[in-house]
Image (cartoon, rainbow, N blue to C red):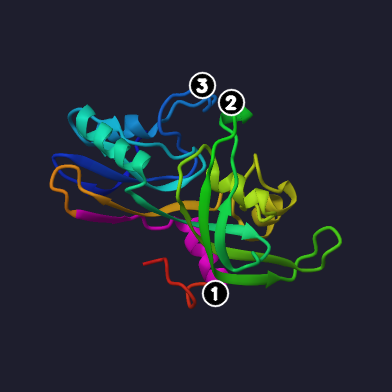
Amino acid sequence: MDTPLQLLHLDETLVAVNKPAGLPVHRSVYVGPADDFLIDRLRAQVPGPLHLAHRLDRPTSGVLLVGRSAGIAAALGAQFTDGAIAKTYLAVARGWPEPAAGCIDYPVAGAHGAGPRKDARTHYRTLATIEVAIALGRYPQQRYALLQVEPETGRFHQIRQHLAHVHHPLIGDGQHGRSDHNRLYRQHFGVHRLLLHAWRLRLAHPASGATLMLQAPLDDAWRGLLARFDWQRQFDVAA
């Protein structure tokens, strides 16, 4: 609770924060045991009313929007619902997607598989690839890809479900991913988190209507992996 959040934008209307991986946004029946929440930390930093405009999964990091009134949060939520906010994520997946860029159009299930599947579309583009000489199963080398991902819709675990559906699960995904590759990253690369980061949001400011571009810096785990795989030369996301 003592660690301050990195504020990406602050004005009288809205707050944008860089959510750390592993920190739940708020209390929920889906979160499980926890005593530290993003919204509580933010209330200790920013005075006045604060209302969440959207959510990020507990293991996901990146840009999170908070309205400074219920009306502003509702207006931001409407932009998300209408698809007016452009969302760009960074992800590391097992394997090399083929084709290297495309759209995954596949209905996904809700929380814990409840309810009917809903239409969902996720656009992706391969930014960089690597093959590491670490044996796993029957393969002496393993392939991984750095992806830029842009969800068109906003379903529960959409990116995670979609990449798993096309057999390129995200590294660190304990629910939809591969435990053997997650373990490889912990043991060999010291990565203990889901490699999914809400990198950029482009939206209309709810008060002025001006275009607002927000970008969340990467944490140490991400920056260390980019340096180790020499991915910064192909796509410099560390700035």
Residue 26 x/y as whole percent: 40, 28
Residue 173 x/y as whole percent: 62, 45
Quadrant assignment, res 73: top left
In the orientation shown, which residue stands out farthest toward the right? 138
The answer to whether any part of residue 193 appears in the image is no
Quadrant assignment, res 40: top left
Amino acid type, callout 3: Val
* Residue range of the region highlighted in magenta in the rendering: 211-229
Rendered image: mark on residue 29 = 3
Helix, strand or loop at mark 3: loop
Is 201 or 110 nearer to us in this picture? Answer: 110
Q: How far apart are marks 3 and 2 (CA)?
A: 17 Å
The earlier-in-sequence mark between 1 and 2 is 2
Residue 219 x/y as whole percent: 44, 55
Amino acid type, callout 2: Gly
Rendered image: mark on residue 230 = 1
Left or right side of 234 for 179: right
Is 178 or 238 nearer to us in this picture? Answer: 178
Position of the N terminus, as image quadrant, is top left
Is 79 or 21 nearer to us in this picture? Answer: 79
Q: Does the residue at mark 3 contact the one at mark 1 (Cβ under 8 Å)?
A: no
How many neighbours does mark 1 have within 10 angstroms: few (below 14), some (14-19), or many (20 or more)?
some
Q: How far apart are marks 3 and 1 (CA)?
A: 40 Å
